[in-house]
Image (cartoon, rainbow, N blue to C red):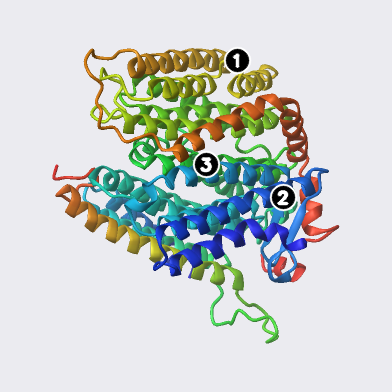
Amino acid sequence: MTHLVMLPILLPLIAGSVLLLAEKLDAGSRRAIALAATLALLPVALLLLERVGDGTHLVYALGDWAPPFGIVLVADRLAVAMLLLTAVVAVASLVYASAGDDARGPQYHALFQFQLLGINGAFLTGDLFNLFVFFEVLLIASYALLLHGLGARRVGAAMHVVVLNLIGSALFLFAVGTLYGVTGTLNLADLARVMPLLGPDVAPLARSGALLLLGVFALKAALLPLGFWLPRAYAAATGATAALFAVLTKVGVYAILRVYPLVFGPGAGEVANVAAAWVLPAALVTLAFGALGVLAAQTLRTMAGWMVVYSVGTLLVAVGLFTETGYAAAVYYTAHSTLASAVLFLLADLIARQRTAAGDRLDTADVMPHVTLLGGLFFVTAVTVAGLPPLSGFVGKLMVLEAAQSSSSAIVSWPVLLVAALVVIVAAARAGSALFWRTAPGPAAGQAAPLDRRSVGAVAGLLACVFGLVIWGGAATSFAWETARQMADPSGYVSAVLGEGGGVHEQRRSLR
Amino acid sequence: MEALVAIAIGVLTGTGVFLMLRARTFPVLLGLTLLSYAVNLFLFVTGRVVVASAPLTDLGLATYPDPIPQALVLTAIVIGFGMTALLVVLALRALRDTGGDHVDGGER
């Protein structure tokens, strides 16, 4: 079963291609194929989790070309945790879309599978150029999913996203080219091996390549000042798509977590800790702006979009410390914030459908149907996203605060984290009271669509996962800690990929 | 030779950035295309500029160009071409749906 590592990429690729060809099939069968393929990702991710649980790196050389010449896929704790998270969110999002959203445009299911292909590939790859390719795969699918159902608002939002990301791709290639020109390799493990050997003459080039790359990842992760595109785009997408997009920003965060500790970590000689001075300040600005955006939002969807920005800020405060405690907090908080944002987007869509006239505007309207159920779901979700006890948001925030405590930046990061959390609590409370309590007297609007069982099931299922993160909190945090330990010591990754003493072929090095 | 290639990349990038800062979709599109040309050229020369030689090791040549950037640039060209095509379609769609070719939609 050495090919297991390949399955999270192959499954969506095959399913997507089949769905593309099976245009004649009825909607039900296409849904069934898509759902089966997405559900199958869950056991695959769990099997991989069991394999990497003892700290091994599963290395898969594509076409059996030995690294560093061939492209490798590497599954370690961090990558597999992200795969599992993606599978969970994807299943919920697909179930939600099956309630009718998937029929609003052609080829929804095929695009959804290609999106998963890109995301899973980006998590698994061990090669910088291959990471670029998978980024493009997931981006082109995301453009199409964002446009799904069309409308002027969506086209306008997509225009910005596409142009920005094309600029991002160009910068990505400039960064990759610079790093290749300096080191002669693009394999992440090999880059980590070569970096400490760089002389002071080429180190500035490597540093500029590394920082250019950070800019690209920051754009994908919606780190301010490069994140203003996100709220508008995510608010314009359909609910199910926006829920899946909650994973998309985390791909940018994952790329930072993967590349910087490994390649530009403390042992990288002249280019050691190149990102440390930049990530934390940007994260704090993102956090503060995100909280303000949440407070200022006029609609529930925009609020959910700003909530993503806010959670990315919190997450990158932990990442920006570049310490083991920081990585552990980041891993746990990634799981929590992805699930919480996905739930919020689905719920916002559900609520907007029930309040037919007012939509998701935080405004006075008639009492919506099913107000008890939706109000209850919103309450639990709000408690999660605002980081109140007893749910996972609280645990995550506590871990971030604890990690930030030991750093000298705590004097800035603690107040920003705590005040922003308070602002988000106020905003969530205000949104809840506006939606559910500030109602106009009069007969309820009767023409709202009946509540679909699948939609509620998807929301409730994701919320159950949030509860799971707390109920099995001990296991989750200890997994986060082990992952952090693995990330803080890149030598395991390097020797797993290259073997002992491997590296760039001497003949090619002589070219430089 | 290096200086010539570097100037070409610089001019392409500069023109591309200038055009991307326009407010209409068509100049932005052209700017992105020029930027992607600059990227392709840049990637191509990351293997160093070697004149009159083939990227093959078994010919016994004293110097030969690095073949990997050539493979990378092929991939980058294909992806860039696909993305540009998508953006053209999107720009046309935005023109139809929003009634203008301003990047924020509409006629401003």
Locate residue B46, reporting x and y percent.
Answer: 55, 63
Position of residue A474 relative to residue A17, above or below, is above
**Precedes in sequence: disc 3 or disc 1:** 3
Residue at image mark 2: A192
Mark identifier at residue A229: none
**What's the CA distance linking mark 2 and mark 1?**
40 Å
Q: Nearer the viewer, residue B67 or A96?
A: A96
* Crowd tier of the residue under label 2, counting other residues whose Cα lies within 10 Å: few below 14, some 14–19, many 20 or above: many
The residue drawn where x is 60% and y is 19% is: A394
On-image quarter of the N terminus of chain A:
bottom right
Q: Secondary structure at mark 2?
A: helix
User: In the picture, residue A392 is in which quadrant?
Assistant: top right
Task: Please identify, in this view, whether the residue under mark 2 or under mark 1 is nearer the observer.
Answer: 1
Residue with the mark numbered 1: A389
Asked if A469 appears above or below A440 in the picture, the reply is: below
Q: Please identify the quarter of the rendering in which residue B82 is found.
A: bottom left
Q: Position of residue A416 (x, y in %)?
A: 52, 16
Is B84 drawn above or below residue A327 in the view shown?
Answer: below
Residue under pointer 3:
A92
Residue A244 in sight from this viewpoint? yes
Specify which label sits upstream in the sequence, 2 or 1. Answer: 2
Q: Chain of mark 2?
A: A
The quadrant where residue A500 appears: bottom right
